[in-house]
Amino acid sequence: MKRTLFVLLAFIIMWPLLAYSGEYEVKGKAGGYTLEAKIDKNPPARGSNNLTIMMKDKASKPVTGAQVQVHYFMPSFPGKPPMMEYTATAQPVGDHYQAQMDLSMAGEWTVEIKVKHQRSLASTKFTFIVK
């Protein structure tokens, strides 16, 4: 009986730590670069979400001095334009880039990160669900 009570109490105490998910992370290729994107909420939520982008070269070294645009939208039905569509410019902060996305409603969102660095243009996309 004591053992069962102990296990139950330990579970109740540890549950908030187990439930915390950290950041939403994705990786993608954009031309010769690897982009690692992290959203501060996991899962991403309605309202303000902070996006951190790390851009790395083929040697896995951070790339600075790029222009980074974040285009995010809610896909629509085939042949129709996106329902909600926004663009944010990611600002350089040290060796990474930061942007803020305002996700106005629940549903599927697509994010396209476009980078311009030393005359090369590249992009990568990912999707997620906002509840």
Image (cartoon, rainbow, N blue to C red):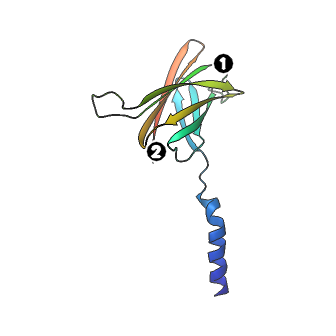
Q: Residue at x 57, y 26 (%)?
A: 33
Residue depicted at x 43% and y 40%: 105
The kind of residue on which mark 1 rests is: Gly
Pointer 1: residues within 10 angstroms few (<14), some, or many (20+)? Answer: few
- The answer to whether 88 is drawn above or below residue 45 in the figure is above
Counting the numbered discs, the total is 2
Q: Earlier in the sequence, mark 1 or mark 2?
A: 1
Residue 83 position, x and y percent, is 36, 32
Q: Of all residues shown, which one is farthest toward the top?
A: 119
Horizontal side of residue 130 vs 93, given as left or right: left
* In the displayed structure image, the side of residue 128 where residue 75 appears, left or right: left
Task: Relative to 62, say whether 10 is above or below.
Answer: below
Q: Which element is circle 1 on?
A: loop
> Residue 61's quadrant in the figure?
top right
Task: Kindly state the secondary structure of the residue where label 2 is placed.
Answer: strand
Q: Is residue 67 left or right of residue 85?
A: right
Residue picked out by circle 1: 65
Most foreground residue, 70 or 45: 45
Residue furthest left in the image:
79
Q: Position of residue 108 (x, y in %)?
A: 41, 41
Residue 129 % position (x, y): 44, 44
* Circle number at residue 130: 2
Q: Residue at x 60, y 45 (%)?
A: 23
Question: Do tag 1 and tag 2 residues touch (Cβ < 8 Å)?
Answer: no
Q: Quadrant of residue 60?
A: top right
Q: Answer above or below: position of 101 versus 16.
A: above
**Whole-Å distance between the Cαs marked 1 and 2?**
31 Å
**Spot occupied by residue 54 in the image (x, y as percentages of width and height):** 63, 31
- Pick out the residue farthest to the bottom: 1
Q: Residue at x 58, y 32 (%)?
A: 100
Amino acid bearing label 2: Val
Q: Quadrant of the N terminus?
A: bottom right
